[in-house]
Image (spheres, grey):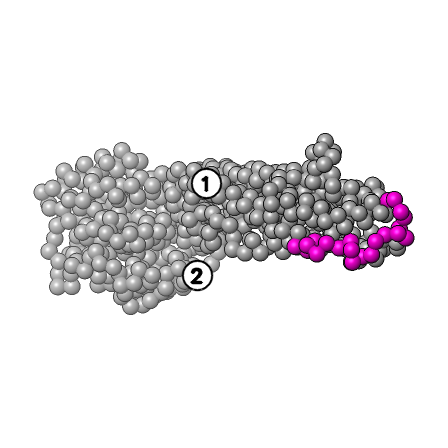
Amino acid sequence: MSDPSTPSALIAAIVRLRQALVDTPLPFEAIDVEVARDERDKLIQQLDDYVLPRLLQSDAPLLVVVGGSTGTGKSTLVNSLVGSRVTEAGVLRPTTRSPVLVHHPDDARWFAADRLLPELERTDAKARDQGTLHLAATEDLPAGLAIVDTPDLDSVEERNRTLAGQLLATADLWLYVTSAKRYADQVPWVSLKSAAERGAAVAVVLDRTTHAAVREVSSHLARMLTARGLGDSPLFTVAQSTLDGDGLLPAHVVAPIRAWLDSLALDPAARAVVIQRTLDGAVASLGHRARAVSEALRTQERLAAELRDVVVEVYADRRASATASCFDGSLLRGELSSRWQEFVDTGELMRSVEDRAGRGLDRLPSVARLRSPSAEQLMDALGAQLSALLVEEVQSAVEQTAARWRLVDAGSAVLDAAATDVDRVASGVEARVKATLEDWQSTLLDLARAESADRHATSSFLSSGVHSVVVALMVVVLDDPQVAADRPQSTAATGRRILGGIFGHLTMQRLIDAASENLAHRIDQVWRHEQGRLFEVLGERRFSDGAAEQLLELSREVDDIRWAGAQA
């Protein structure tokens, strides 16, 4: 049942903070990113497992989590506090087993799967599955009190250690169990330090210590607790004792601890003080912990921008190189130049143009004599050369981008994790480029035919010799106009004479401009498609723009509401 006085504004702000954390997975590799990821995951877990449930259910039982190192007697202590064997102990440890939550039968509803550690399957039988939570109901515990026996904090199994830490983060009260041999162990003190920083309620049990050593060890332990900000934590001692036939400690040995726990369970005000202390500490820690994640997220945003900028820069450079090579006439050197010259030197096409200019349209030679039998072949050769150039430039862009990404850990991780080989040209790129250029050539054919519609005297020529016209148009487009103007006998100059003779200067220039713009547009299409593959890979690791700032603002909002509530 929810507490009517629960601050709804704080709950709403924490819910928004939680969602912002969920939406920021810190996907890029960077220095200390693992620390930030771990902190983010722990924050989400604590919000889900403790802070939000406790804010919404302030009258739920006091949850006492018993934790400590291997061999300190945690399970034996739990059994002895309850008065019966509810959890396994002794030689079976540190083998894998599920955590055990002991509670009064009337409190069973509080520990349903949707209220506490929802990822753990509930069972009422002892289990060795770390994915289950053994719920042990007994009337030997008073209502309002629940005790959890956790795996060892220093377990040899990582899953046990992780689960122990997660369970401790759900505690209203951590009952830390140690012994004369283990009280100085480093691992549990790391967790104790974290508990102190969060202001969590902690009590300490010095177990398995001989009567002669109790005073000396407990004094030293008390000083260690004080030095670490836990000086006000209750400290109980359990001297080394002989277990009874059920493996339990004598009742009088654990009586002070049981009496203290019973007093908390039976006194709502005392229980509320412990719960509120831990809850306040957990909420107070959210701000600076979320800000640490926000700082890591700023690094993530920078890395994402840098990787994207590499793609944009490299592809723009190779796009400019491809465009220059397409239009500067370099494609028309060597074999293609010879084939074009051979095509022109047949004389038929040039004579037809000269005849049109000198004798009039009615004296044009027959269509059959105007068509070169190699026009389609020359179109194919020009298209193939252009296709090879574009594929080569795409390959260069991919390789250069991958090489620069490999210079940073974030980029290498993206490449290694990609579902496809994004450091290589995508399969089918040759076919896509070829199809794109064939579409361009088809567009040129359509342009030439469209011009013939208003030119009845030449329409017969264009309908049959249109491939020859398109060859000339392609040659002019693929040669730099300025170079052609400077060299009247250049490849482009010859093509211009042909086109000008057929269409006239104005129409010729309009055709050249349209063909050039269309080719540039299709080159852009090729580049956008190939560039998009890398953007998609980055997009799989994206987070919303301004996510770091949003997380920072939400952490401040939680702090502001908390402080306002404290002053009220």
In this rendering, position of residue 548 left or right of residue 214: right
Magenta-colored span: 357-377
User: Is residue 112 something one can see in this rendering?
Assistant: yes
Residue 408 found in image quarter: top left
Task: Pick whichever, 4 or 367, lies toward us.
Answer: 367
Question: Which amino acid type is shown beneath numbered disc 2?
Answer: Asp
| Label 1 packing within 10 angstroms: few (<14), some (14-19), many (20+) | some
Q: Residue at x 26, y 53 (%)?
A: 157
Residue 27 lies in the magenta stretch = no
Q: Main secondary structure of the magenta part?
A: helix
Q: CA distance from mark 1 to mark 2?
A: 48 Å
Task: Pick whichever, 200 or 539, lies toward us.
Answer: 539
Question: Which amino acid type is shown beneath numbered disc 1?
Answer: Ala
- 103 over 329 or under it: above or below: below
Residue 265 found in image quarter: bottom left
Query: What mark, if any, has residue 403 been given in the picture?
Result: 1
Residue 374 lies in the magenta stretch = yes
Percent across and percent down for residue 560 are 52, 38
Q: Residue at x 18, y 48 (%)?
A: 207
- 296 over 372 or under it: above or below: above
Task: Pick whichever, 375 or 48, lies toward us.
Answer: 375
**Residue, far left:** 212
Residues at discs 1 and 2 in contact (Cβ within 8 Å) = no
Q: Is tag 1's residue or tag 2's residue first in the polypeptide sequence? A: 2
Percent across and percent down for residue 307 are 50, 40
Q: Residue at x 24, y 43 (%)?
A: 235
Percent across and percent down for residue 244 are 13, 61
Per the image, label 1 sits on a secondary structure element best described as helix
Q: Which residue lies under the disc numbered 2?
A: 114
Q: Residue at x 10, y 56 (%)?
A: 242
Query: What mark, if any, has residue 73 been given in the picture?
Result: none
| Label 2 packing within 10 angstroms: few (<14), some (14-19), many (20+) | few
